[in-house]
Image (spheres, rainbow, N blue to C red):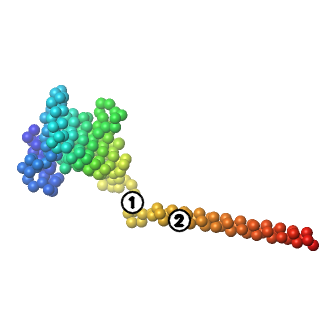
Amino acid sequence: MLNRLRADIRAVKERDPAARNSAEILLLYSGLHAVMLHRPAYFLYRHRFYFLARLISQTARFLTGIEIHPGAKIGTGVFLDHGSGIVIGETAEVGDGCTLYQGVTLGGTGKDHGKRHPTLGQNVLVGSGAKILGPFTVGDNAKIAAGAVVLEPIPPDSTAVGVPAHVVRQGGRRTCKPMDQVHIPDPVSQEFCKILMRLERAEKTIAEQQKELELLRGQLGGNNQNETV
């Protein structure tokens, strides 16, 4: 337990530039407190002391704003940065060295039984507000962008963004064509172009009809003159 605590404090020191010393981290970091309280809760849960385990986890939730089910497996050196609003489900697994920012949810979809929550490999980074939902694996060293909603497995060394999330980088290489942020089409201009094209077609049609009408008038006029003669 002491070795794990040291590793958790060291992880905060390495990943949070605002952390000044171990005493500050130990006394003031709510993410560390949530992980510290989860350790005995997980021990009690594994030994079927479910009520005591939930009592500790709910106390931790009240004190830190972070909800970790006592059945979840949390590795060593896990850093819950800021931490407020993080929810980790019963069958979730968080590997060593992971970093989770505020508002992250490791949850289920309500459609699965048994293993219902995701498994994060080692050194996974999950951005603020991201939701990872379902019993699949996010590979080692993966990065999940802020606000992403992940509904399927993510390969190792990948970056996933969007709703639903898709992989945009893997092994340091892009997996899709980057968006041109400068030459973005103007939707208003495109609609005006469509309207102008319709007007041009309408004017052309009207001009053709006018010509046909003039020809028809000419033919009728010629017939009337012949009848008069």
Q: Say which of 226 and 18 sits in front.
A: 226
Quick check: 148 left or right of 207?
left
Q: Residues within 10 Å of mark 2 (few under 14, many from 20)?
A: few
**Residue at image x 33%, y 45%?**
150
Q: Residues within 10 Å of mark 1 (few under 14, many from 20)?
A: few
**Residue at image x 79%, y 67%?**
216
Image location of residue 146, percent across then percent down: 29, 51
Q: Which mark is residue 122?
A: none
Image location of residue 66, percent across then percent down: 20, 43
Look at the image and tell me whether residue 63 can be seen.
Answer: yes
- The first of marks 2 and 1 along the sequence is 1
Image quadrant containing the N terminus: top left
Image quarter for residue 67?
top left
Q: Classify mark 1: helix, strand or loop.
A: loop
Residue corresponding to mark 1: 179
The Cα–Cα distance between marks 2 and 1, rounded to whole angstroms, is 23 Å
**Residue at image x 9%, y 45%?**
6
Q: Say which of 198 and 185 sits in front.
A: 198
Q: Say which of 75 and 65 sits in front.
A: 65
Which residue in the rendered view is the most extreme toward the right? 229
Image quarter for residue 118?
top left
* 2 and 1 marks in contact (CB < 8 Å): no
Look at the image and tell me whether residue 144 can be seen.
Answer: no
Image quadrant containing the C terminus: bottom right
Image location of residue 55, percent across then percent down: 16, 33
Instruction: Report the amino acid beneath label 2.
Output: Cys
Q: Which mark is residue 193?
A: 2
Image quarter for residue 140?
top left
Q: Classify mark 2: helix, strand or loop.
A: helix
Instruction: Report the amino acid beneath label 1.
Output: Met
Quick check: 34 left or right of 180?
left
Q: Considering only vertical position in the picture, is 153 above or below 194?
A: above
